[in-house]
Image (cartoon, rainbow, N blue to C red):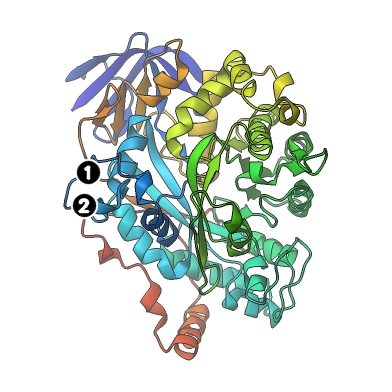
């Protein structure tokens, strides 16, 4: 079937297009127009904005920490009732099923779960398989686990770590690697309560800096498209911008991605002991072309924070709202779930809100700053439409900033910033740039041969309303959303990276798991048949 989306405003930064035109779909691909072939369907897109489907590179939507949060906070999910009764976890409120629907209604078609412990990868993939419509991927966590730290302690060299990274990616069917508070979580097991970039992990004798640089090199040498995804030390602490600056400087000439930089954008100036250091971070990012970041914007309201940074979650447990939390240990990272409410009247929360906006507005290149709230840590992903509006409308932004304490606003540059994002920049930051960062050449654009993941929006004065309810969304050429409501359910696939694995590393891992656990190393492998659905996985290749 040939479908023509006719007369829309095509916004496609990957091909430097912003013009009125037609778009043709056949099957699951975008195709070139043909004088011989007449469309079977013509969709009138006059007055509509046409973009590729959105891509979210950092959203916690599956896995053990997410489900612990559901169990801890059922009251946050009861209002979301749209799901089949037979769906796994359907009695847990905002289920996996609802996640896919909500993303699709906003025009997003690909989402990355950025923090999966390798031993929980099978569970995460099973849960992701229950999320409809969107394609998914995971990042596997390394950097606090005994095997990597043991290799470094023994001086086995970068090649051994590289081979292990390849084995982890293959075994977990991941798209890349993330490190969370490198070494800090391992140090927490020895009752260390603060851990910075040059601190040394007890027992192993390696620093956080060494762990990050070793994993960064391994990821790069393997040709993994997405750079090492770094959750820095000292999250949420006043003065922690210095840690982020140290990490940026340590990148040297290799690619590096810093996650949720807003949570590292704090100085320690003023009577309250917290101030914005976003200008210093933005200056460093602007000057370091091989570094990319996502923001992790904080928005006001109730949420729940989930993280494998057990050290920092343990420290934050006293701020839980409501007053309940879960901290659990385990191999490598463990996890922490702490409910939290961001309040406009709170000096600290107001500075956090402003810091995120400053990073968006002060970092020049929309190809290197990525749109996230670190769902659900800064805010649920459902606030994306409001955040788009704040970035595109300085008057609306001024209204929001007027709600926060004047003393807090004065500790930031946010009130003075007049930049307004264009729709072209929004499309860059949420479509073209994420596809390039993740190595997904088949999406994020509207070129011939691209995957027919397409979102149409009806522009209006209410920008949030436009982004909240897409006029139409196509996933692989199927119409799945019309006028902001899901009309057709289908299941996407999990995107995985294909990495060659050294035979010696396979033998080494067999020995390690047998000696440490009395189990074969295959016990944690995600098998092809784990997902009872045709074609559940899609492979992409390393660049090497």
The image shows residue 240, relative to residue 15, as above or below, that is below
Q: Residues within 10 Å of mark 2 (few under 14, many from 20)?
A: few
**Residue 356 position in % (x across, y down):** 64, 35
Find the distance from the CA under tag 1 to the CA under tag 2: 7 Å
Q: Position of residue 478 (x, y in %)?
A: 24, 33
Occupied quadrant, residue 526: bottom left
Front-lying residue, 430 or 42 = 430
In which quadrant of the rendered view does residue 234 lie?
bottom right
**Observer-nearest residue: 345 or 507?**
345
Residue at x-position 69% and y-position 57%: 233
- Answer above or below: position of 247 versus 153: above
Q: Is residue 370 visible?
A: yes
Location of residue 58 in the rendering, given as x and y in whole percent from the top left corner: 50, 46
Secondary structure found at label 2: loop
Q: Nearer the viewer, residue 332 or 219?
A: 332
Can you name the residue that lies furthest to the front here? 323
Residue at position x 48%, y 40% in the image: 302
Res 178 → quadrant: bottom right
* Quadrant where the C terminus is found in the figure: bottom right
Please say if the residues under marks 1 and 2 sit with CB atoms less than 8 Å apart: yes
Relative placement, left or right, of 539 versus 213 is: left
Q: Which residue corresponds to the image point at 55% horizontal and 71% vertical from the top-left?
A: 332
Q: Secondary structure at mark 1?
A: loop
Residue matched to label 1: 83
Q: Could you tell whether 368 is left or right of 33 in the image?
A: right
List the residue tagged with mark 2.
87
């Amino acid at each position: 079937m040939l479908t023509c989306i006719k007369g829309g405003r095509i916004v496609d930064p990957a091909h430097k297009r912003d013009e009125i035109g037609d778009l043709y779909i056949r099957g699951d691909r975008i195709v070139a127009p043909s004088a011989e072939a007449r469309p079977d369907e013509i969709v009138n897109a006059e007055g509509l904005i046409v973009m590729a489907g959105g891509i979210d590179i950092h959203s916690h939507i599956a896995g053990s920490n997410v489900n612990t949060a559901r169990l801890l906070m059922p009251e946050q999910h009861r209002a979301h009732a749209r799901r089949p009764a037979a769906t796994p976890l359907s009695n847990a409120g905002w289920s996996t099923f609802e996640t896919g629907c909500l993303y699709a209604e906003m025009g997003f078609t690909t989402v990355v779960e950025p923090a999966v412990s390798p031993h929980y990868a099978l569970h995460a993939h099973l849960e992701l398989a229950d999320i409809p419509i969107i394609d998914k991927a995971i990042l596997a966590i390394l950097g606090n686990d005994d095997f990597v730290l043991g290799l470094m302690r023994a001086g086995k060299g970068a090649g051994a770590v590289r081979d292990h990274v390849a084995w982890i990616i293959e075994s977990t069917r991941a798209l890349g690697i993330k490190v969370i508070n490198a070494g800090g979580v391992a140090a927490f097991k020895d009752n260390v309560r603060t851990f910075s970039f040059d601190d040394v992990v007890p027992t192993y004798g390696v620093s956080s800096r060494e762990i990050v640089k070793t994993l960064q090199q391994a990821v790069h040498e393997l040709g993994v498209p997405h750079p090492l995804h770094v959750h820095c030390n000292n999250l949420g602490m006043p003065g922690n911008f210095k840690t982020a600056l140290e990490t940026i400087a340590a990148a040297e000439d290799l690619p590096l991605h810093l996650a949720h930089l807003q949570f590292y954008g704090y100085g320690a100036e003023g009577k309250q002991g917290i101030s914005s250091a976003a200008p210093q971070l933005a200056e460093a990012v602007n000057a370091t072309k091989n570094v990319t970041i996502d923001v992790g914007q904080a928005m006001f309201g109730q949420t729940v924070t989930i993280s494998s940074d057990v050290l920092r979650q343990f420290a934050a447990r006293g701020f839980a709202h409501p007053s309940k939390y879960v901290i659990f240990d385990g191999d490598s990272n463990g996890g922490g779930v702490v409910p939290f409410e961001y309040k406009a009247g709170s000096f600290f929360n107001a500075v956090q809100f402003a810091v995120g906006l400053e990073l968006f507005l002060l970092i020049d290149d929309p190809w290197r700053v990525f749109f996230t709230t670190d769902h659900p840590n800064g805010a649920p992903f459902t606030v994306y439409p409001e955040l788009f509006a704040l970035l595109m409308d300085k008057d609306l932004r001024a209204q929001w900033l007027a709600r926060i304490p004047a003393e807090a606003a004065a500790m930031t540059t946010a009130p003075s910033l007049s930049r307004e994002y264009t729709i072209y920049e929004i499309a860059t930051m949420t479509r073209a740039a994420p596809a390039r960062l993740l190595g997904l050449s088949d999406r994020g654009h509207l070129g011939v041969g691209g995957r027919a993941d397409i979102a149409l929006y009806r522009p209006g004065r209410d920008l949030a309303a436009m982004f909240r309810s897409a006029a139409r969304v196509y996933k692989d050429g199927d119409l799945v959303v019309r006028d902001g409501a899901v009309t057709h359910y289908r299941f996407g696939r999990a995107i995985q990276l294909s990495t060659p694995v050294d035979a010696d590393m396979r033998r080494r891992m067999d020995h390690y798991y047998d000696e440490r656990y009395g189990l074969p190393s295959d016990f944690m492998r995600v098998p092809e048949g784990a997902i009872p659905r045709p074609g559940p996985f899609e492979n992409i290749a390393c660049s090497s």
